[in-house]
Amino acid sequence: MLDVEKIRAEYPILGRTVEDKPLVYLDTAATSQTPRCVVEAIDEMYYCHKANVHRGVHTISQEATDLVELTREKVRDFIHAASTEEIIFTRGTTESINLVASSLGDMLYNGDEIILTVMEHHSNIVPWQLIQRRKRIKLCVVPINDQGELNLEAYEDLFGDNTRFVALCHVSNVLGTVNPVKEMIDIAHRHGVPVLIDGAQAAPHNAIDVQELGCDFYAFSSHKMYGPVGVGVLYGKRHWLNTMAPYQGGGEMIGQVSFERTTFAPLPFKFEAGTPDYVGIAALGAAIDYIQRLGLENIAAHEHQLLEAATTGLMSIEGMRIFGNTPDKGAVVSFLVGNHNSYDMGVLLDKLGFAVRTGHHCAQPLMARYNVDGMVRASFGVYNTLDEVHRFVEAVRRVAALLG
C-alpha cells in the first residue's frame, strides 16, 4: 500500500493554510496537484535544455527533441498504443476532441448523426455543435437511469443508416460512473461506426489499453494526472489519422510548401503545428514515471478507500443526496444537502479549509437530467488521507447545520 505521508511531502501546497485552516484539497478531478519531481523536470528543461524541437541540428535542440520523443514513447507504453505515430500532443482533452471534431467534420454530410451521452462534459458537446453550424448533422443522446448508468439498449437503438460517429466519456467527471466503454465500442464497430473516448477522468486512475478497448480515438490531459497544465494527448488509430485533414496549419506539420500547394509531414507531426509546449511535454513524461512508480493499482485502491469512507460518512447527514451510485465508480462524490445551494456550501467549506468544486461542472445537460442547478463535488487524489475525509464529512455536517 502507499505511504501517503511520504507522498504528501512531495506536494508543498498541502502544507499551506486557507482562512487560517489547514488546506484539504478535494478538487483533483478538476486539476491535480503537482509533485516536486515534475516541477523539477520543468526547471531542468528551462535551465538546461530550452531550445526549439525537431528543427535544430545543435546539441541543445537535439536534447529537447529527444526528451519530447521519449515522452511520446512513455505515453505510447502508458496506454498500450501500437505506435508512437498514433500519439499526438495537444493542449489538453478539450483540444484533442476539437481536433477530431474539426477534422472529421469535413467528412460529414447533412443528415449524418453523432451519438453522445447525457453525462458528457461540455468539451465533448460544444465541438460537435460547432460542426452543426457548418453541416446539418444531428446529435443523438444516450440517457441514464437515476443511479447514473447508461441505458445500453437505448444506445444500440440510436444506431441507424446515418450514424457516423460516437463520442463518450470513459468516466463521468460528475457521477464517477465508469462506463462500459469496451462493450459500447464493440456495439459501434458492429455498425461500422468509429468511437472517441474522453479519458480525462480515467487515465490518472485506471490502466488504459487502447488496443484492448479497440477505440479509434482516446483523449486525456496532463494536468489531471499530476503533470503540468497546457499539455494533452490524443491517441488515434493510424488509419483515421492518415485519413483526416490537419486541424491547424503552420510550421513543423508540413512536408513541402509552395504558393501552389502544400504537402504534410508524416504522423504524428501532421497534427502538431507550431512550437509545442516541449517543456510541459517533457514534464508529462516525469508525471507518467511518477504514476508508474506508485502503481495505478495502488492509486486506485487508495482512492476507492477514500471514496467509500466519504460516501458512508456523507450518507449519515440528514437530507444528503448523492448523485451517481454505480458500483466501482471513480473517486468523486457529488452531492447536495436538502435544498441548500451548492455555491453557498462551497464558500462555507472553503472558510473551513476545504477546496471542493461547486456548480454545474461543465455538464449542464446532466444537471438538467437531475433537475438541479449544480452540485458540490469532492474528488480524491493519491495525496488525500482518511483523516481528511473524516474531517470533511464533519465540515459538511457543520455547514448544513449553519445553513439551517
Image (cartoon, rainbow, N blue to C red):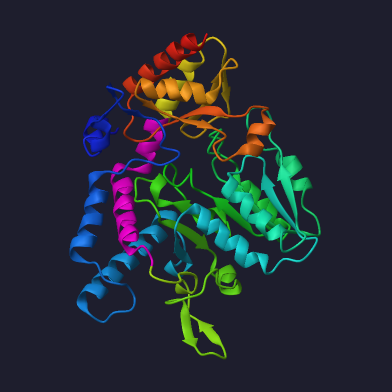
Q: What secondary structure predominates along the stretch shown in magenta?
A: helix
Q: Residue at x 33, y 30 (%)?
A: 384
The spot of residue 57 in percent (x, y) is: 26, 82
Asked if the magenta segment contains residue 372, the reply would be: no
Query: Is 175 on the left or on the right of 27, as rendered?
Result: right
Q: What segment is highlighted magenta in the picture?
A: 276-303
- The answer to whether residue 149 shows anywhere in this view is no
Residue 84: image quadrant is bottom left
Query: Where 94 falls versus 204 (above or below)?
Result: below
Q: Residue at x 40, y 16 (%)?
A: 395
Q: Is residue 298 magenta?
A: yes
**x and y percent of residue 123 in the render?**
57, 49
**Which image quadrant: the N terminus?**
top left
Q: Position of residue 99 (x, y in %)?
A: 55, 62
Image position of 372 (left or right of 40):
right
Residue sitting at 21 percent across and 35 percent down? 9
Between residues 391 and 385, which one lies in front from this camera angle?
391
Residue 101, quarter of the rendered image: bottom right
Q: Is residue 114 above or below residue 27?
A: below
- Closest to the observer, 225 or 47: 47
Q: Nearer the viewer, residue 286 or 58?
A: 58
Q: Is residue 41 visible?
A: yes
Above or below — where is 378 with respect to 173? above
Number of disc labels: 0
- Residue positioned 32% across, 48% down in the render: 292
